[in-house]
Amino acid sequence: MIVGVGCGSRDNAERAYGPAVAADAGLHPVRIHAPASLTGLRGSVRDPNGQPTEVPCATCHAGRTFPLPSSPAELGGPHAGMRFRHGTNVCASCHDPASAERLRLADGRVIPVSDAMALCSQCHGPQARDYAHGAHGGMSGHWDLRRGGRVRNHCVDCHDPHDPAFPSFVPMPPPLDAPRRAPAGRGQTGAH
Amino acid sequence: MLGATLGAAAFARAMAPLAELTESTSVAEFMQKHYRELSRDEMHKVLRRLEGETERRYGREVTIRDVRPTPGVQFAYALNLSVCIGCRQCAEACHQENNHDRATHNSYIRVLEMENGSNDMERGRTDYDHAVPAPGKFYMPVQCQQCENPPCTKVCPVEATWQEPDGIVVVDYNWCIGCRYCEAACPYHARRFNWERPVVPADEINPDQAYLSNRIRPQGVVEKCTFCLHRTREGRLPACLEACPTGARVFGNVLDPDSDIRWVLENKRVFVLKEELGTQPRFFYFFDV
């Protein structure tokens, strides 16, 4: 068995993995990414850098309420053409009929659209639990919060609330030297 | 013991058909002591020399560090097969992070396309070329399983590959003689051989490098996944995990009872590949049930 040379003193180890792994141990923060779709619509106007501008929901909705449609086909204005495929849900399963800027939980409590994760979690307990333990939803940054922070994706980064099935992808090309179930041999390409 | 192997290793190296002794091996490189015998000072010199060589050959200034394991850390990795869609973004991220040869599009990760219900990795295909996920299939990325009981290290005639205290199996590329016994011994096909000196354009080189991981490998040596030790030993997540668009990968320190990886191992029905071989991988797979 080989023991690493000079890999830090015991003190260091204690500091890195001491008994208190609790949140109070001066850990770096875990932040949840805030997708722009929760607070605004992507406009057709571009900013001076060529990036599409974001029009906040409030620009059109502050103090104004439209009737919540009963089917997506009835929805017009800037939201026309919205696709909806999310189980047996109806618009009012999630939206507060009194305000386009609010969502409504099953118990009647209303929350801002930006808190959408609480909404998803109430119907998708297993995924919400897995997410809380890093086993759903992915992350970037540090596994060791003592050394740096972490950023988590939001449910709606990956799932459109109206059409949540994960999209299909065109895969990256395979490595060229590793054909499997093809004649063995170096330099053989696995791609067709 | 190591002293005794020095002569044998040097001899074997001299005999290795692919070693670049004629072209470029300097006396300093030839005489370099085994990684585990180097003092801090000597290591410092080796790293500066390798940085200089990389800059001369590849036209890019890089930093090569000797990142050591942290006491109290044992790494493990888990992958959620219910969520993976086979997009190969992990393999691509590995390709870039680890300075792999561009022409062969090499990566330490192979993604196997498997029939639903099958669990024989030998029947997985790596050459699929259609939108994913395809109906009736699931996808299984395979990389070094960092076995607790690694068959690969045992067959190395010169001790150029070994398991570190945090569980990562590494190769000293300057010590490897290129015999490829380890590659043959690995039941997961996780080791790769550098037939050529890797070609990577200067502006695509990842300059953040470590001696035992992603520094550009010499020709004629074996290489493998190191769980991105240049990142993970500093608390960061592996490149393949960050690149995964589906969030299928979970990584961390199994000795930390509050870690995500511990939660997965305790709460999901995890399995390992080719368990019957007794290799005891620290790479786990699971399905959501």
Image: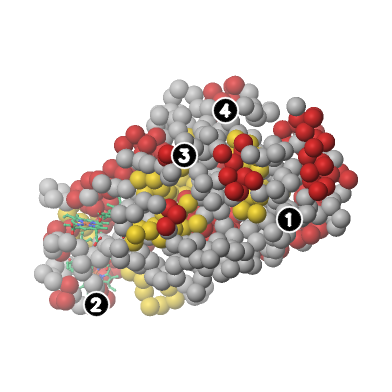
Residue drawn 88% across the image and 45% down it: B27
Number of residues whose C-alpha sits closer than 10 Å to that of mark 4, classed few (under 14), some (14–19) or many (20 or more)? some
Q: Residue A81 carries which label?
A: 2
The residue tagged 4 is B71
Res B20 quadrant in image: bottom right
Q: Residue B219 carries which label?
A: 1
Label 3 SS: helix
Number of residues whose C-alpha sits closer than 10 Å to that of mark 2, classed few (under 14), some (14–19) or many (20 or more)? few
Q: Where is residue A23 in the image (x, y as percent from the top left)?
A: 40, 32
Q: Which amino acid does label 4 sit on?
A: Pro
Chain identity of mark 3: B
Please check whether the numbered discs 1 and 2 fall on a single chain. no
Res A82 quadrant in image: bottom left
Chain identity of mark 4: B
Number of residues whose C-alpha sits closer than 10 Å to that of mark 1, classed few (under 14), some (14–19) or many (20 or more)? some
Q: Distance between the residues labelled 4 and 1?
A: 33 Å
The residue tagged 3 is B277
Q: Where is residue B207 in the image (x, y as percent from the top left)?
A: 68, 54
Q: Distance between the residues labelled 3 and 1?
A: 31 Å
Chain identity of mark 1: B
Res A83 quadrant in image: bottom left
Please check whether the numbered discs 2 and 3 fall on a single chain. no
Q: Where is residue B66 in the image (x, y as percent from the top left)?
A: 69, 39
- In front of the other: label 1 or label 2? 1
Callout 3–callout 1 Cβ contact below 8 Å: no
Q: How far apart are marks 4 and 2 (CA)?
A: 57 Å
